[in-house]
């Protein structure tokens, strides 16, 4: 059996989400391909503007420590619909996400995840098509211990999905062990192999407990999600102005502040089950 991290033929997009798993994957691919074919490989990071500052720092550090260029992309509501940025110029106040909400005039939710589709998937696609790519392999950081993400069919689009971590049997404990041995790391909590504030800080696909932790520990960042509900309400009908059906972020904040810290210790006070994960 060959090396599961050996690059396939043709153009390859390596999707770097800014997290530990995809950075681990990138390092394994780099090590397995010493003659890095930069003319046909693109490492992309799609910034939504709602990533924690530590995530942006980590993407920059990966570029420096691993010696690999990462193309930073952001959604733009008009014109070419994407722009190339870097650590210095990347949005940090949710600007790309807000542009999308203003254009669509309603909020994404569990049933309509157009934020992931537009801010990450299509933004990368537009960039790669701009480069002149017609077809490519899309390398994603799905692990072997994520069964809920393994049964998706190949997309009917211009790319084929490659999941080398699955082929290599890599789980979250392998990723954690790798980062413990490195001289740099993502400066966000690693709790049993998961990062509560990874990806979009207050993503509606995260369990209520993670969102409540954001409200309690980072109220300034949680406020943006309330502001977007207010914005959507001014643009659309009420039912299209909440991230989750019948639940407003402001109401959740009132509840958390009124109840106190005990709800974080009570297993049934808040939903702790993730409903999905933003990937890019």
Image: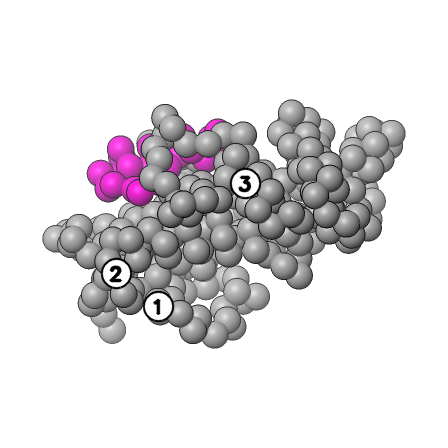
Q: Nearer the viewer, residue 12 or 109?
A: 109
Report which residue position mark 2 lands on: 133
What residue do we see at 50% from left, 71% from top? 152
- Classify mark 2: residues with Cα within 10 Å, few (<14), some (14-19) or many (20+): some
* Marked residue nearer the N-terminal end (3 or 1): 3
- Between the residue at mark 2 and the residue at mark 3, the CA separation in whole angstroms equals 27 Å
Which quadrant holds residue 69? top left
Quadrant in which residue 87 is drawn:
top left
- Which residue is disc 3 drawn over? 99
Quarter containing the N terminus: bottom left
User: Horizontal placement of 178 versus 36: left or right?
Assistant: right
Color encoding of the figure = one colour
Quadrant of res 255: top right
Range shown magenta: 52-72
Which mark sits nearer the N-terminus, 2 or 1?
A: 2
CA distance separating discs 2 and 1: 9 Å
> Residue 229's spot in the image, x, y percent?
71, 40
Q: Kindly state the secondary structure of the residue where label 3 is placed.
A: helix
Residue shown at the point (60%, 42%) measured from the top left: 102
The answer to whether 184 appears left or right of 117 in the picture is: left
Q: Residues within 10 Å of mark 3 (few under 14, many from 20)?
A: some
- Between circles 3 and 1, the one closer to the viewer is 3
Image location of residue 227, percent across then percent down: 69, 33
Identify which residue is drawn at 36% across, 54% down: 126
**Residue 32 appears in the rendering:** no
User: Residue shown at 57%/66% (left/top)?
Assistant: 148
Residue placed farthest to the left in the image?
A: 35
Q: Is residue 225 left or right of residue 13?
A: right
Q: Secondary structure at mark 2?
A: loop
The residue under label 1 is 158
């Amino acid at each position: 059996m060959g090396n599961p991290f050996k690059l396939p033929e043709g153009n390859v997009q390596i999707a770097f989400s800014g997290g530990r798993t995809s950075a681990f994957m990138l390092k394994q691919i780099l090590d397995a391909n010493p003659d890095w074919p930069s003319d046909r490989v693109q490492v992309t990071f799609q910034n939504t503007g709602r990533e924690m500052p530590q995530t942006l720092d980590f993407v920059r550090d990966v570029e420096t420590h691993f010696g690999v260029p990462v193309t930073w992309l952001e959604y733009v509501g008009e014109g070419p619909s994407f722009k190339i940025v870097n650590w210095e110029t990347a949005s940090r106040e949710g600007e790309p996400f807000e542009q999308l909400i203003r254009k669509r005039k309603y909020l994404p939710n569990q049933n309509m995840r157009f934020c992931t589709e537009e801010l990450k998937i299509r933004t990368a696609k537009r960039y790669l098509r701009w480069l002149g790519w017609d077809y490519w392999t899309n390398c994603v950081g799905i692990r072997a211990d994520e069964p809920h993400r393994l049964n998706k069919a190949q997309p009917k689009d211009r790319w084929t999905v490659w999941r080398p971590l699955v082929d290599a049997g890599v789980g979250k404990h392998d990723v954690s062990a790798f980062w413990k041995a490195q001289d740099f790391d993502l400066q966000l909590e690693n709790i049993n192999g998961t990062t509560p504030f990874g990806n979009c800080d207050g993503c509606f696909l995260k369990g209520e407990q993670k969102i409540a932790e954001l409200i309690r520990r980072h109220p300034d960042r949680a406020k943006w999600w309330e502001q977007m509900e207010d914005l959507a309400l001014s643009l659309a009908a009420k039912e299209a102005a909440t991230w989750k059906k019948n639940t407003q972020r402001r109401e959740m904040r009132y509840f958390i502040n009124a109840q106190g810290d005990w709800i974080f210790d009570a297993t049934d006070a808040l939903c702790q089950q993730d409903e999905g994960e933003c990937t890019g």
